[in-house]
Amino acid sequence: MATVLCVILYVLALSCSVIARPATFLQYFRVAWSDSHIRQMEEGKAIQLLLDQTSGCGFASKYKYLFGRVSMKIKLIQGDSAGTVTAFYMNSDTDTIRDELDFEFLGNRTGQPYTVQTNVYAHGKGDREQRINLWFDPSLEFHTYSIMWNHRHVVFYVDEVPIRVYKNNEAKGIPYPKFQPMGVYSTLWEADDWATRGGLEKIDWSKAPFYAYYKDFDIEGCPVPGPTNCASNTKNWWEGAAYQDLSPAEARRYRWVRSNHMIYDYCADKSRYPVTPPECMAGI
């Protein structure tokens, strides 16, 4: 699928443009920190992130986006990755009122399942963690991770399987991220105070360095700066009727994931939330 970026030609007042997908990592991304730990591969179309005792690393998109879809293929750390976190997320970078949509891949001891944690921040309010154990080994080959974000809902996908839905329920007084553009980020870092079994499992630095691999970066959305009417354009494909709700097949996959692979849901954590948060009653 071509990438709708609404960029470059915005000076011509076009609402959208269709151009080829990114040819290289650096065409649409930049190294955010520790460039010595990020290596380009396949003529810049793929990258390797490295974590060792001196540093982790991260990268960021050159533009922010307001609505659309972002995806990338990732191959996670092989072997004993306990205490590490590989993150792929969108963030408005606006401090206390930030909006954020998170994938966080929590490292494991060899032989244990990889856990992916998702979180949603809206108007500065987060603490909406959900965790699932992946039904495959994400370190053996690349898998696609995507965030779909439109006026109706946010959907997190793993290989086109929806694992989380956060609906727009502003009519019920529930915050929804729709005003602030967000950049696309990824990081590889040490978090052994919480990442694996609540911090019980620490990083085994004898296994370092740790590597994660990325390719097929795809951003389709309204860039900022860009045409002011892009985000409100109902003709954007991600605002189409097919993307207002999960399809029946997607809904079945979603329920399968939730029934068989979810290990934590803040909605059901009565120790944190004696009263169920209102967004948890929204369904899909």
Image (tube, helix red, strand yellow):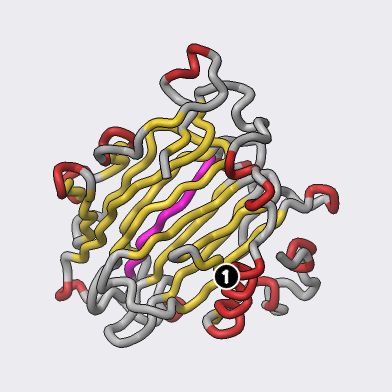
Give the magenta range. 84-93
Q: Position of residue 167 (x, y in %)?
A: 70, 56
In the image, residue 227 sits, relative to residue 91, either above or below, namely: above
Instruction: Write the residue at 14% across / 43% down.
Output: 43
Determine crowd level at label 1: few under 14, some 14-19, many 20+ residues with C-alpha closer than 10 A: some
In the image, residue 185 sits, relative to residue 208, either above or below, namely: above
Q: In the shown orientation, is residue 22 left or right of residue 270? A: left
> Is 173 a magenta residue?
no
Instruction: Write the residue at 62% across / 56% down.
Output: 126
In the image, residue 2 sits, relative to residue 258, either above or below, namely: above
> Is 85 a magenta residue?
yes
Label 1 sits on residue: 130
Secondary structure at badge 1 equals: strand
Q: Main secondary structure of the magenta part?
A: strand
Q: Position of residue 58 (x, y in %)?
A: 31, 48
Quarter assignment of residue 209: bottom left
Residue 132 can be seen, yes or no: yes
